[in-house]
Amino acid sequence: MARYKGINQLSGLDRIVVALMIVVPTVLVVWLVWLPAISSVLLSFTNWNGIGPIGQAKWMGLKNYHDVVTIYPPFWPAVRHNLIWLAVTFLVSTPLGMFLAVLLDKEMRASRVYQTAFYLPVVLSLALVGFIWQLLYSRDQGLINGLTGSKIDWYGDPKYNLWAALVAACWRHTGYIMLLYLAGLKGVDVSLREAARVDGASEKQTFFKIVFPVLAPINIIVLVVSVIEALRAFDLVWVINKGRNGLELIATLVTQNIVGEASRIGFGSALATFMLLISSVFIAIYLRIVMKEQR
Amino acid sequence: MTESVQPQTSAAQVLKVSKTATGSGQASRPIQVFLAVMALIWFFPVFYAILNSFRDYNYTSQHGYVSLGGFTLNNYKNAWEQANFSHTFMNSVKITVPAVLLTLFLSCCVAFVVARFSFRFNLALLGLFTAANLLPPQALLIPVYRMFRRIPLPEFLSSSGTMLNSHLGLILVNVAFQTGFCSFVLSNYMKTIPRELYESAVVDGAGVLRQFFTLTLPLCRPPLAALATLEVTWIYNEFFWATVLLQQGDKFPVTSSLNNLRGQFFTDNNLVAAGSVLVALPTLVIFFALQKQFVSGLTLGATKG
């Protein structure tokens, strides 16, 4: 290693360049992501109404949190909807995506064409997905009602709209999950699989004994991705009805409390902190896996 | 959301996906049929949107949607005018192009320093950046919104006079969110560049900047091409920040302006379909062009090693 010793020694100018290369992006990220994240947490303990100077805001302790869980009607429905969102996208998209990936991993003529079809919705924005499915769901002009003759307003009726939105969300999510597993399957040792076949293992045995263990770390990544996606779910319901009437989600509640007519900063921040708390747990898990691979 | 949560390895994974199958043998007939049916189902909503974007509203309202006929191009003409697409597409370009360029440039800087110099804190640094990429944007809305409202901007940067309602603010937020993911992918790639190359560059008297621009960046063309396509798609698709940070309709990018096609009491779905197809078109073009680019990037990487 002695030979390489010299190349990390920098001249004065180079030192400034290196410092700038790292400081400029860091400042940007700290300013627009970390500082706001910390501010959200701090604001959640105050009663700042967003109008007066921030210095006059009073420290309220946990009052905002107490109010959120006790006297804010949409909160618990929103939590329930977020949990349903997570459960459905995870429990439907994961097995389906994995199944499709395993099938697509076989030799066949049109594999690329199929992959394209499943991956296609992923390049569309969730907002656009909402508009595209409106064509199927609309009460008077939608294809579903046109075929079945029903009069259900799929996006409007609080009995159905969450599920309608979830079908659209899964449509997009599954292709993405499939892609993750498809990439993971490339890591499966081909010779090991050959050996299993020679030994007379059934396809099912081969999958559970050889393929699945390789996919295990991806399962955790998929779980984390699903949790974070479920927490962030916003675009789709916002284009449907701005997250009201059966489509309340925590993300839309935060937004309504800030951008809407009545801005309740402390209150909205308590909701935001709630989101930050859950997401940081899963981000930590995620970083642990990724960083381990790094080393 | 930001568009979607981006797993750190996805660019590399997308590259790998286009490789030939490693799987267990030939697919049997039932599997082929099953996949074909599933693929058709998956493609159907997009197909249906395209189909109805070409149909006359009066025809479909009279005959119902389970019919065929009444083809017209008028929906596109009307959607283009009603959603002011010529203007909003320009807005999307004004937001996406600078945001992607800036994201890639800053990510290259971070990745270069992390990969080239073994700083002890480089993992922590990457953690700082990638975690930022995964935080729910809604949770950061309040401070960002309030901050932007307070920051004055000169007239030529923002007609609103503040960072709020300006394209600059939106661009910076997008860059801040996307830099983590790109730095991570790029630093992984840059770590594979042999130290000997830098060694000889240093012997030749190249400073850090020259190493960066003439050695590292040209070698990073394949991941940069892949990341550029992904980032263009994601930032173009970005909806949340665009909706809340730009409140004036004339600044909206295309996705946010789709709402103009929905009337308060009545919505012509064929018009919405045409608008959706128009908005999807750039990403679809990129998507199909991008697959080829990935394959070429793959062979480039293969021959280089």
Image (tube, coloured by chain):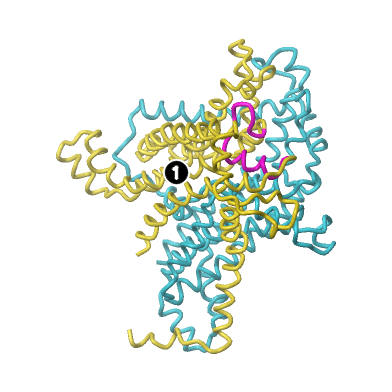
Chain colours: A yellow, B cyan
Q: Amino acid at mark 1?
A: Leu
Q: Evaluate whether residue B221 shows in this view.
A: yes
A251 within the magenta span: yes
| Farthest top residue in view | A149
Residue at coordinates 70% horizontally, 57% vertically from top-left?
A56
Q: Quadrant of residue A146?
A: top right
Where does the image place residue B197, in percent across and percent down from the top left? Answer: 44, 79
Instruction: Please provide percent x and percent y for residue B35.
Output: 42, 30
* Residue B1 seen in the current view: no
Circle 1 SS class: helix
Q: Which residue is mark 1?
A: A179
Frontmost residue, B126 versus A177: B126
Q: Relative to residue A243, is residue B105 depicted above or below?
A: below
Q: Nearer the viewer, residue A279 or B118?
A: A279
Residue B171 position, x and y percent, is: 68, 57
x 74%, y 35%: residue:
B259
Which stretch did the figure color magenta? A242-260
**Label 1 lies in what chain?**
A
Taking the image as shown, residue B303 lies to the left or right of residue A66, namely left
